[in-house]
Amino acid sequence: MNRPWNKRVVLGAAVVLAVAAVAAAGVLAVRVSAQDARAPAAGAPPTANAPATADAPGAPAAPGAAARPALVVTAVRPSRVEVADRLSANGSIAAWQEAIIGAEISGLRLAEVRVNVGDAVRRGQVLAVFAAETVRADLASAEAMLAEARAGQGEAQAALGEARANAERAQQVKDSGALSAQQVTQYMTAEQTAQARVMSAQARVQSAQAQVRSQQLRLSHAQVLAPDDGVISARTATVGAVTAPGQELFRMVRQNRLEWRAEVTATELERIRPNMPVDVMPANGAQIRGTVRMVGPTVDPQSRNGVVYVDLPPGSPARSGTFARGEFSLGSSAALTVPQQSVVVRDGFSYVFRLNPDGRVAQQKVQTGRRVGDRVEIVDGLKPEVSIVASGAGFLNDGDLVKVTP
C-alpha cells in the first residue's frame, strides 16, 4: 500500500536536486563572464581608468610616496644628577641587651608575681615577692645573738677595767714590799687575761653582726627587683613555686632598646662607619631611621658576612626577632641618568633606543645602576650627547621609523 507514496517522495527529491544544480551552474557562468570582462586583452596596456592598487600582490609603490612612521615619540638626552649612594642589606631585629632576672634565694615559696610580659618597669621596681616568714625568724634569732654578744662584750670590758686598776695599784706598791713579786705578777696576768676576753667578746659581736646582715640580705632577696629600666620580654615565674638559686624568673629588654643586626659582605664592611644613618624597613612596612653603633670585628667563615649593629630609636614599631631590610646612606655622587621609561628590558638585558639623523631608531644595550625617583643611572653603554627615545620605547624595534615631537 505504501509503494505509490514512496515513489512520489523519490521523484520530488530528484526534482529539487536538479533545480539546485542548474542554479549553481548559472552563478559560475556569471562569475567567469565578469572576470573576462575585467581582464585586458593580451599585450594591451592598462587603461587610465584602471589604476594599480597597493593591495594587489606585486603592485609597485606610487612614485614619491613617503614611508609612514611606526610611532610618534619624544626625545631626551641623558643628564648628570647627584644620586645617593646606598647599600642594601638584610638582617634581624634583636634586643640591645636582654637581662635575665633570677632568684637569689632558695627554699622559699613564690607568693606574688606583680608583672607580666610586655610591662614597662623601672629600676628597683618589685617584680615578685617570696614568702619570707622563715627568713624573718632567722633574722630575729640573729639579732638576739647579737644582743647577747654585745652583753658579753660589756661584761668583758668591765672585768678588764677592774683588772687594769688592780694591776696599776700593784705596780705602785711593788717597791714598798706590801705585795710580793708573785702577787704583782698575778695582777698583771689578770689584766692581760681580761683584755683577751674583751677582744674575744668583740669578735663574737662582729660575728653576730655578720649573721644579722646575712639574714637581712636574705630578707631583701625575698623581693625580686628590676635591675634597670626596660620591658619584660619573658616570664617563667609561677605563684606557689619553690625556686632554686639562680633559677630564671623573667627576661627584660634593657632600656627598651632594640638594634638591627645587618649582614653585610666582607668587601662592603669597609664602606660602613659608626654613626652612619640607616633606613630600616621591618616586616610591618614601617620605615625607621637608625644609626650605626658598631661594625662587627669578625666575619663568619661560612657565609663570609659580617654583622653591623644599628641602634633603633626607643618606641619604634620594630619587634625583636623579626626580619628587616635596610639601606645604609654612604653619601652621594654624580651619575648619568635617563628617564626610567626610556629603558626597555628584553631577554634579561637593558636597552635604550638611540635616535639617528634619518629618523630611525637603533637599539643600544646599556648597563644600569642606581635608581632615584623616576630616573635610572646608566653605568655603561651611552654617551651624554646622544638623543634617545623618552616615551614609547617599549613599542619599538631596532630600525623602526619614528616621528619626533618637541
Image (cartoon, grey):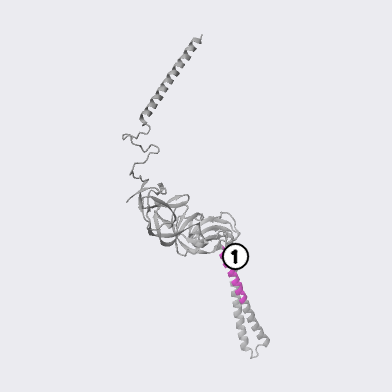
Q: Position of residue 316 (x, y in %)?
A: 45, 56
The image quadrant that residue 76 belongs to is: bottom left
Dot 1 crowding, Cα within 10 Å, few <14, some 14–19, many 20+:
some
Q: Is residue 213 magenta?
A: yes
Q: Position of residue 406 (x, y in %)?
A: 32, 51
Foreground pick, 215 / 42: 42
Q: Work out which residue is located at the far bottom of the displayed protein and give it.
A: 176
Query: For the residue marked with disc 1, what is the amino acid?
Result: Ser
Horizontal side of 110 relative to 30 (left or right) equals right
Q: Give the magenta part as a residue range.
A: 199-218
Query: What residue is at 47 percent from the left and 14 percent from the top?
Result: 11
Q: Main secondary structure of the magenta part?
A: helix
Q: Position of residue 81 (x, y in %)?
A: 38, 59
Q: Does residue 127 show up?
A: no
The image quadrant that residue 247 belongs to is: bottom right
| Placement of 44 over or under 356, stated as above or below | above
Horizontal side of 112 relative to 18 (left or right) equals right
> Which element is circle 1 on?
helix
Foreground pick, 195 / 57: 57
Horizontal side of 284 relative to 69 (left or right) equals right
The image quadrant that residue 47 belongs to is: top left
**Residue named by callout 1:** 141
Foreground pick, 274 / 345: 345
Q: Position of residue 322 (x, y in %)?
A: 50, 54
Q: Does residue 203 show up?
A: yes
Q: Is residue 123 magenta?
A: no
Query: What residue is at 45 percent from the left and 19 percent from the top?
Result: 17
Foreground pick, 396 / 311: 396
